[in-house]
Structures are given as structure tokens and as C-alpha cells.
Image (spheres, helix red, strand yellow):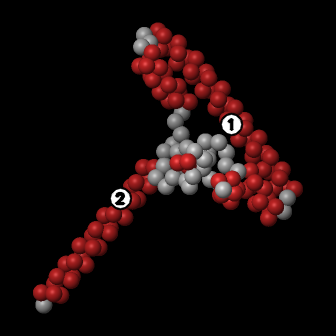
């Protein structure tokens, strides 16, 4: 009788423990996905860092923020332009190539620089710690070839 009660109590403890760890894993996965900071947020962080490191006064800090914000806006517009050009190229290739050829072409493109940032914090990409670019967007095969 005592063994049966003990077995039931042990089973309940195991179930409660597995539920708690599953919830923790879900919470960790939700915390990993972060939205990209806005241009203004990036400029403010850079300005704050420069203010601290260089000992800028308030007037200098405002001027630096203006310069950094303008630079970040230019970078973002270039990034958006490149994204549109890549999408247009992919659409053209898709209309020319067969499905198999298109898939192979996508793998041949390889990972884009800094493509891994903010996407896989907990489950780091293979080779990322060795200074290699991360494999994303179905380009793993190409990355594997380059890594060897």
C-alpha cells in the first residue's frame, strides 16, 4: 500500500516538474525573439555611448545625435533599397528557372552578412562561434559547403 502511494506521489512530482520546465522553455523562446530597434533608438544608443566615452556636454550630444541619426537613416534607406533589389532579382530568377534550379540558385547565394543577428540567440548557428556567417533562409547547404 505504501509503495503504491509513493509511486503515485512520485509520478505527480514528475508531471509537475515537466510542466514547469516546458513553460520555462516557452518563456525563453518568447524572450529570444526581439524586434529590430528603430533608427532613432540606434542613434540614441550610439549618442549615449559617445557621450559617456568622450565626455560630451549637452550641446555636443545633441549635435552628435543629429549626425548619427542622419547616418542611420541613410544606412536604413540603403538597406531597404538592397532588400528590394534582391527581391526583384529573386522574382526574375524564379520566372526564368525551374523550381529545382531556383532552389539550387537560392542555396548558391549563401548567407548574407550579419543575417544571423537577432534571429538565433539561444540556438546559435553551427560555425557562428568560429567567425562564420549564420545559415538562414534555406541556404544551409551552401553554408555547409563553404564551412568545409
Q: Residues within 10 Å of mark 2 (few under 14, many from 20)?
A: few
Q: Quadrant of the C terminus?
A: bottom right
Q: Residue at coordinates 71% horizontally, 41% vertically from top-left? A: 83
> How far apart are the two marked residues, 1 and 2, measured between alpha carbons?
36 Å
Q: Which element carries disc 2, helix, strand or loop?
A: helix
Please give the label number shown on residue 80: 1
Which x, y percent locates residue 2? 12, 87
Which x, y percent locates residue 53? 43, 19
Q: Is residue 116 visible?
A: no
Q: Residues within 10 Å of mark 1 (few under 14, many from 20)?
A: few
Q: Is residue 132 above or below residue 27?
A: above
Which x, y percent locates residue 45? 47, 27
Q: Which mark sits nearer the N-terminus, 1 or 2?
A: 2
Between residues 86 and 143, which one lies in front from this camera angle? Answer: 143
Q: Is residue 40 visible?
A: yes
Q: Which element carries disc 1, helix, strand or loop?
A: helix
Between residues 103 and 113, which one lies in front from this camera angle? Answer: 113
Q: Which residue is mark 2?
A: 24
Residue most toward the right?
96
Q: Is residue 29 above or below residue 69?
A: below
Please give the label number shown on residue 109: none
Which x, y percent locates residue 131? 57, 45
Amino acid at each position: 500500500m505504501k509503495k503504491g502511494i509513493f509511486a503515485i506521489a512520485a509520478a505527480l512530482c514528475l508531471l509537475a516538474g515537466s510542466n514547469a520546465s516546458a513553460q520555462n522553455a516557452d518563456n525563453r523562446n518568447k524572450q529570444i525573439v526581439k524586434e529590430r530597434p528603430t533608427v532613432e533608438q540606434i542613434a540614441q544608443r550610439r549618442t549615449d555611448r559617445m557621450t559617456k566615452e568622450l565626455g560630451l556636454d549637452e550641446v555636443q550630444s545633441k549635435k552628435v545625435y543629429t549626425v548619427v541619426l542622419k547616418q542611420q537613416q541613410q544606412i536604413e534607406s540603403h538597406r531597404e533599397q538592397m532588400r528590394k533589389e534582391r527581391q526583384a532579382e529573386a522574382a526574375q530568377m524564379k520566372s526564368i528557372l525551374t523550381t529545382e534550379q531556383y532552389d539550387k540558385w537560392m542555396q548558391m547565394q549563401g548567407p548574407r552578412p550579419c543575417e544571423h543577428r537577432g534571429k538565433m540567440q539561444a540556438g546559435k548557428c553551427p560555425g557562428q562561434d568560429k567567425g562564420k556567417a549564420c545559415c538562414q533562409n534555406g541556404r544551409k547547404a551552401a553554408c555547409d559547403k563553404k564551412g568545409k
